[in-house]
Image (cartoon, grey):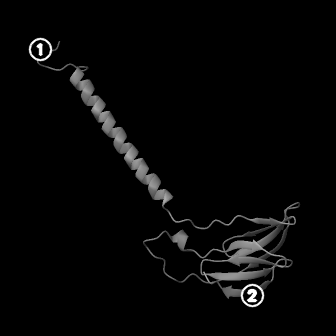
């Protein structure tokens, strides 16, 4: 059995040591998970462009084009490519690559046109009926 000066496997000292180690482990695990969560939540957002529905037609934008889809039949009425730049520029290695992409984003549907912008501060005016590109201008923002 155990001698008088030896601590047994479940002595109060060993239980206390185990509890302290468990608390330290939990504290560090929570700290690391909190850091990971903060890291991901601080990540720059690529783009948030929900589709806009007007008069039964859904107008949506994707990487470099905008399209109109009839809601009742899900038929694509038109699709227009807005820019076809070749990506030759270098990406900043300190930022995530996907947040540096140039992505079209639908902004507003007007009476006769759809306004779409991109990350290079351009605004594209697209004909609402047939999808033809009416004009491109530099945004003031």
Q: Residue sitting at 74 percent across and 77 percent down?
A: 115
* Helix, strand or loop under label 2: strand
Nearer to us: label 1 or label 2:
2
Quadrant where the image shows the C terminus: bottom right
Q: Disc 1 or 2, which lies upstream in sequence? A: 1
Q: Horizontally, is 9 left or right of 71 in the view? A: left
Classify residue 93 by image quadrant.
Answer: bottom left
How far separated are the C-alphas under marks 1 and 2? 92 Å
Secondary element at tag 1: loop
Would residue 83 be visible to someone looking at this image? no
Q: Name the residue under label 2.
A: 135
Q: Residue at x 30, y 30 (%)?
A: 19
Nearer-the-camera pick, 52 or 25 = 52
Answer left or right for 125 relative to 88.
right
Q: Is residue 108 left or right of residue 71?
A: left
Image location (x, y in percent) of residue 4: 11, 14
Question: At which x and y percent is residue 70?
Answer: 86, 65
Disc 1: CA contacts within 10 A as few (<14), some (14-19) or many (>=20): few
Q: Residue 4 carries which label?
A: 1
Report whether 8 appears left or right of 4.
right
Quarter residue 76 falls in: bottom right
Residue 55 seen anywhere in this rendered image of the structure: yes
């Amino acid at each position: 059995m155990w001698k008088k000066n030896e601590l047994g496997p479940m002595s109060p000292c060993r239980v206390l040591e185990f509890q302290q180690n468990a608390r330290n482990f939990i504290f560090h695990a929570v700290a690391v998970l909190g850091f990971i969560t903060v890291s991901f939540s601080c990540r720059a957002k690529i783009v948030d462009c929900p589709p806009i529905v007007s008069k039964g037609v859904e107008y949506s934008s994707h990487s470099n084009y905008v399209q109109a889809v009839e809601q009742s039949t899900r038929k694509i009425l038109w699709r227009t490519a807005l820019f076809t730049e070749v990506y030759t520029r270098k990406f900043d290695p300190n930022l995530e690559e996907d947040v540096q992409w140039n992505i079209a984003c639908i902004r507003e549907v007007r009476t006769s046109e759809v306004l779409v912008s991109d990350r290079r501060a351009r605004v594209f005016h697209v004909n609402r009926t047939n999808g033809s590109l009416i004009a491109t201008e530099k945004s003031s923002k």
